[in-house]
Image: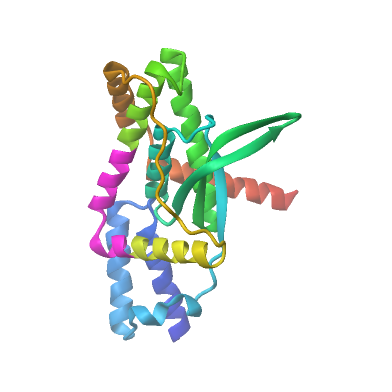
Amino acid sequence: MNEQKVKDRVRKLLNLAENDAASEGEIQNAMRAAQAYMDEYHIEREDLREDDAKPVEMREGQAYGGSANVARWEGWLSLAVSNVVGTVGVYSGKSTRRNGFNVKTCGTFTFYGPAEDVRIACELFEEMVGVISTMAAGLYSGVYRGEGRSYCEGFSLELHRRTVQQGKQRSEKCTAIVVRGQAVARHWLERVAGVKLRSRGVGGGGKHHDSAHENGRSDGRSAEFGAKRRGKIAGGLKQLRGGAQAG
């Protein structure tokens, strides 16, 4: 193989190692294979810099919460989604949405990073908002107040805890790749999109209900959330694009 083909193969292996849909064994095998190629052909990390590769399309994409305020449980959920996708960041704000003649103010969660990963993050966030809201409304007849809010907070907090734990279990090299990707995305956000992030709080409000919160955490522990769910969404988006191109 010539040098360019070797570099392309190494990049593909490193991308596989970065993919949350890959198993731990696949990640380790990909990292070993990539390192073997780099050793054999005397390739350093610097030789794989972005200038040598096909440019990655970067973009922002918004997902919407159902409340005018940025609810605490939606904030935790957005961070969990960012952790699952791995290469995207997220920041929150407010926006208005028009539905016919009605204008509604709602919380927004803006994911940024590689275009394909941003699409996955937005889809995953909105899907999980629907799942959590439906369960809370069915159990407690509410989502943003009272026991329903406590349930949603418990559920989202547990999802976030799970993704943090999964991140700790990644190999050191794989984690370094993800951190580097997030740094590139943040640099793009500030340089191209002109957005400088600042910390802000999210709304809690109201009385905390321990029982509902624990029920939410219990359901969050058993919910399908992670590489498998991300993979389903990615596959669905791929099918939609294929159908649109065929039409």
Q: Main secondary structure of the magenta part?
A: helix
Q: Is residue 65 above or below residue 133?
A: below
> Quick check: can you spot residue 211?
yes
Residue at horizontal 28%, vertical 51%? 167
Image position, residue 189 (x, y; %):
51, 61
From the top left corner, tell me how far across and down residue 170 is, in percent: 26, 55
Query: Relative to 53, is 146 above or below?
Result: above
Q: Is residue 168 magenta?
A: yes
Locate residue 241 relative to residue 34 in the image: left or right: right
Q: Position of residue 214 (x, y in %)?
A: 27, 22
Magenta-drawn segment: 160-176
Residue nearer the viewer, 126 or 102: 102
Can the viewer see residue 117 in this picture?
no
Q: Nearer the viewer, residue 41 or 173?
A: 173
Can you give x and y, in whole percent of width and height, for residue 198 in the image?
43, 53
Q: Nearer the viewer, residue 205 or 216?
A: 205
Q: Where, by quadrant of the figure, is residue 42 drawn? A: bottom left
